[in-house]
Image (cartoon, helix red, strand yellow):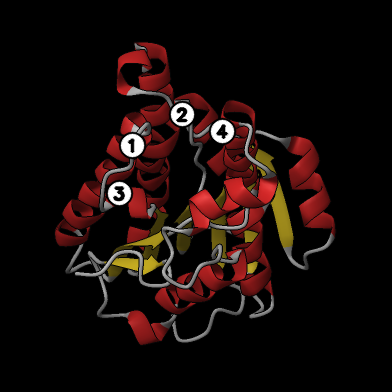
Amino acid sequence: MNDLTNQHILITGGGSGIGLAIAKSFTKSGAKVSLAGRGEKKLKAAVKNLPKAQYAVMDVTDKTSVERGFAALLKTFGPVSILINNAGAAESAPFTKTDPELWNRMLAVNLTGVFLCSRAALPGMMGLGQGRIINIASTAGLKGFAYSAAYSAAKHGVIGLTRSLAIELAKSGITVNAVCPGFTNTAIVEKAVETIMKKTGASRKESLEKITKFNPSGRLVEPEEVAEVVHWLASSEAKTTTGQEIVVAGGEVMP
């Protein structure tokens, strides 16, 4: 981990937002980057602008899809030494209107996806004798938010999985950490703003303020700010940091 040059880094949900910002950060360090996601159009466009990059269409909620995707990506770039579990989705609803389908969707993409991809990456890391698993969680994994019980439960699960796996792998040379962004300037937040506008009749500015109020600095987090923390966790400087959740939210959550 002393040098990220030619390290194989796999990023799920890598076609846009935080995932793409992370990909750009790593390619600047000379890493080989694999992007995975369900939207081939976004993945193909992203790879065109990245050196030493490839992609695979992958549904992180499906075991067979994950296994096929990993096999294709490893064939070209070799074992994954750094896995970024970034794929996720956010749906909101009052708890009494959260049906089993919504509940299962949120757990599948936000939690089961982390489980499946980590299992797929670990044999290669163990063979290398080192590795990094970095899970993109959320401040929703550290506290509750109204109307997002399923999402919050899934992200709390990611934190629990991170801590447990970190202990299990503590002597292996593989670290496992979580990064918890606050509301970030991505398509997911833009969709949330549009939902508030539709349901309340508020202007875009007013709707955005309902979200940015959670951040003491009064603004959205930028994807590049999350990428900087991820890049550090992947470096040799963070070799003794494991089982941690690092918050990137302008002071929204404090111990």
Question: Is 120 on the left or on the right of 45, as rendered?
Answer: left
Mark 4, mark 2: which one is toward the viewer?
2
Q: Amino acid at mark 3?
A: Gly
Tell me whether circle 1 and circle 2 mark residues in contact (CB < 8 Å). Answer: no
Report which residue position mark 2 lands on: 61
Instruction: Choose between 89 and 111: the one closer to the eye.
Output: 89
Quadrant of the frame with the N terminus: bottom left
For the point 37% across and 20% down, the residue is 104
Q: Amino acid at mark 4?
A: Arg
The CA distance from mark 3 to mark 2 is 19 Å
Work out whether mark 3 precedes mark 4 in sequence or the reverse, and give the earlier one. Answer: 4
For residue 47, above or below residue 150 = below
> Dot 4 lies on which element?
helix
Report which residue position mark 3 lands on: 141
Work out whether mark 3 precedes mark 2 in sequence or the reverse, and give the earlier one. Answer: 2
Work out whether mark 3 precedes mark 1 in sequence or the reverse, and give the earlier one. Answer: 3
Q: Is residue 75 visible?
A: no
Q: Is residue 223 visible?
A: yes
Instruction: Choose between 4 and 43: the one closer to the eye.
Output: 43
The CA distance from mark 3 to mark 1 is 13 Å
Report which residue position mark 4 lands on: 68
For residue 246, above or below residue 11 = below
Report which residue position mark 1 lands on: 146
